[in-house]
Image: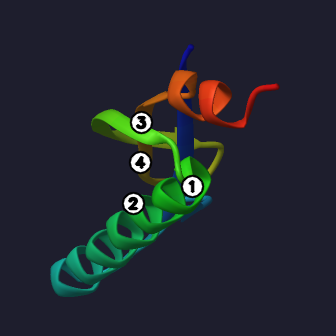
C-alpha cells in the first residue's frame, strides 16, 4: 500500500504592525531557510521510519498569515508500506 506523509514548516520573515514593517536581512533569511529545510527533511525521514521511500518532494511558498509574512515549506514523501505489511503479517 502506498501512503503520502508530509511535514510542514513556517519561517516568519516580516511582521506588519500598523504602517511599520519589520523584516530580516537576506543572510538571516537564507540561514533560516537552510535550517528549516534540513529539519523538514530530517523529520520526514523519522516519520517514514523503515518504510521504503519512493519519492520526495518539497514545496516552498510565500504566504501571509495575518500580519506575519514568510515562507511555508511542505516536504512530502511517497512511501511503500506493502513490504512492511508482508514481512510483519501473520
Circle 3 sits on which residue? 77
Please name which of the two marks, 1 or 4, marks the residue nearer to the observer. 1
Circle 2 sits on which residue? 41
Circle 4 sits on which residue? 73
11 relative position to 1: left or right: left
Please tell me which residue is depicted at 35% across the width and 71% down the height of the picture.
38
Contact flag, marks 1 and 4 (Cβ < 8 Å)? no
Q: Quadrant of residue 5?
A: top right
Looking at marks 2 and 1 on the same chain, the residue that comes earlier in the sequence is marked by 2
Looking at marks 1 and 3 on the same chain, the residue that comes earlier in the sequence is marked by 1
Looking at marks 1 and 4 on the same chain, the residue that comes earlier in the sequence is marked by 1
Circle 1 sits on which residue? 49
| 66 vs 90, nearest the viewer | 90
The Cα–Cα distance between marks 1 and 3, rounded to whole angstroms, is: 11 Å
Element carrying mark 3: strand
Looking at marks 4 and 2 on the same chain, the residue that comes earlier in the sequence is marked by 2
The Cα–Cα distance between marks 1 and 4, rounded to whole angstroms, is: 21 Å
Residue 37 is situated, as x and y percent measured from the top left of the image, at: 34, 64
Please tell me which residue is depicted at 39% across the width and 60% down the height of the picture.
41
The Cα–Cα distance between marks 4 and 3, rounded to whole angstroms, is: 13 Å
- The residue lying furthest to the front in this view is 90
Contact flag, marks 3 and 2 (Cβ < 8 Å)? no
The Cα–Cα distance between marks 2 and 1, rounded to whole angstroms, is: 12 Å
Please tell me which residue is depicted at 71% across the width and 36% down the height of the picture.
88
Please name which of the two marks, 2 or 1, marks the residue nearer to the observer. 1
2 relative position to 77: left or right: right
The Cα–Cα distance between marks 3 and 2, rounded to whole angstroms, is: 10 Å
Residue 47 is situated, as x and y percent measured from the top left of the image, at: 60, 53
Looking at marks 3 and 2 on the same chain, the residue that comes earlier in the sequence is marked by 2
Amino acid at each position: 500500500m502506498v501512503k503520502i506523509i508530509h511535514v510542514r514548516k513556517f519561517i516568519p520573515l516580516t511582521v506588519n504592525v500598523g504602517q511599520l514593517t519589520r523584516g530580516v536581512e537576506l543572510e538571516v533569511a537564507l540561514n533560516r531557510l537552510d535550517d528549516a529545510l534540513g529539519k523538514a527533511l530530517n523529520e520526514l525521514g523519522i516519520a517514514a521510519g523503515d518504510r521504503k521511500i519512493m519519492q520526495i518532494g518539497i514545496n516552498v511558498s510565500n504566504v501571509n498569515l495575518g500580519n506575519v509574512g514568510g515562507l511555508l515549506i511542505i516536504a512530502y514523501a511517497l512511501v511503500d508500506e506493502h513490504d512492511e505489511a508482508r514481512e510483519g503479517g501473520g
